[in-house]
Amino acid sequence: MRSRLLAVAVLAFAAAPAAAADDAWVRWTKDFDTAITACGSAEWCLEKAFSATPLPPPEQLPQDPRSGNDQLVPYAVGNLIRDFRAGNIMLNQPIARYQLQDYYEIAGTAYLGTGFSVPVLGHNYQDGLQREFLAPNLCAQAMAGTSCKARQGRIWTWRFDPATALAWLDKSLPVLLKTHKPISGGPGFGRHRGDAGENALIPPLVVRYGTMTPDQYKGTLGKPGVHRVFLADYPQARTKTVRGFILATGSPDPEAALKAGKSLFIWVYAPGPEAQVVPASWEEVFKLLDTLKPPGGN
């Protein structure tokens, strides 16, 4: 589901910042690198290093040479430029890059950072139209011998064998889910489709897929130990085929994995008003890095 290319494009578009801003970014880059290098590659080092080094303020354009007046950058634009700049720096720091991928599923070349998935079939970032979100790595199915002891009550899980998944790849995603019983969660996720109002920031249902062998599945939405996982907007996804939904999330075509004998897993989650689900943007990632702590830690 997830490009450093956009960060570069935004920075190239932005006018060169003033010397003071350059100095602030040089200092931030050095301080962040020093902090994460000192901590190392252990879990939670990324969060510790980021929260110890506050980001520079939002970007501002230089003075208008014709009037000599400051050109104020709208709040959203200034934050956008700043966040892409910080994200690009982090993706170029080796420890941070690997921890973003290992604990937040953020792959540098497959993450726009705007809350929309990287398009697989398009070459321009504006082709990324599938909304995506970050959620805790919840227990979808309780399994013995794993860390998943109690299922979260608003998650439905389907597992399709390779033959069934291949037969349905180019058929309707919602019809597939409606006509097959989930292995966990029971029937009835559709009753939550109206839980959120129109144009709500967080949709009433989000969806995720994975390909793996049944013995690789440990009951959680993502790999055990991951801090946050990506899910897509189900109201958008339900208009697509199974393959179309997967490609829209920025993921590769699953056909090869299915032909290699892997099963297709699909999870639908109804977050509810108190759930910790946020748009998958750099802004929200930075909030998580600032606030998430180890269990029982400070």
Image (cartoon, rainbow, N blue to C red):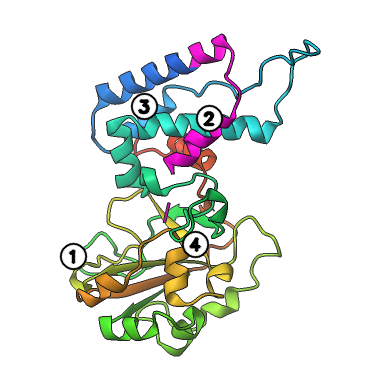
* Residues at circles 1 and 2 in contact by the CB criterion of under 8 Å: no
Report the number of discs: 4
Residue at mark 3 = 49
Residue 86: percent from the left, percent from the top? 47, 29
The alpha-carbon separation of the residues under discs 1 and 2 comes to 48 Å
The alpha-carbon separation of the residues under discs 2 and 3 comes to 24 Å
Q: 57 or 129, which is in the foreground?
A: 129
Q: Taking 185 as reference, is 162 left or right?
A: left
The alpha-carbon separation of the residues under discs 3 and 1 comes to 33 Å
Q: Is residue 132 above or below residue 82?
A: below
**N-term mark: 1 or 4:** 1
Tag 3: amino acid: Ala
Tag 2: amino acid: Leu
Residue at mark 2 = 11
Tag 4: amino acid: Ala
Tag 1: amino acid: Gly
Q: Quadrant of residue 157?
A: bottom left
Please say whether residue 16 is one of the residues in the magenta stretch: yes
Q: For residue 145, which numbered disc appears in the image?
A: 1
Q: Taking 220 as reference, is 123 left or right?
A: right
Residue at 41% x, 23% y: name it.
52
* Residues at circles 4 and 3 in contact by the CB criterion of under 8 Å: no
- Could one spot residue 298 in this view of the protein? no
Q: Which residues are magenta?
A: 1-24
* Residues at circles 1 and 4 in contact by the CB criterion of under 8 Å: no
The alpha-carbon separation of the residues under discs 1 and 4 comes to 29 Å
Residue at mark 4 = 232
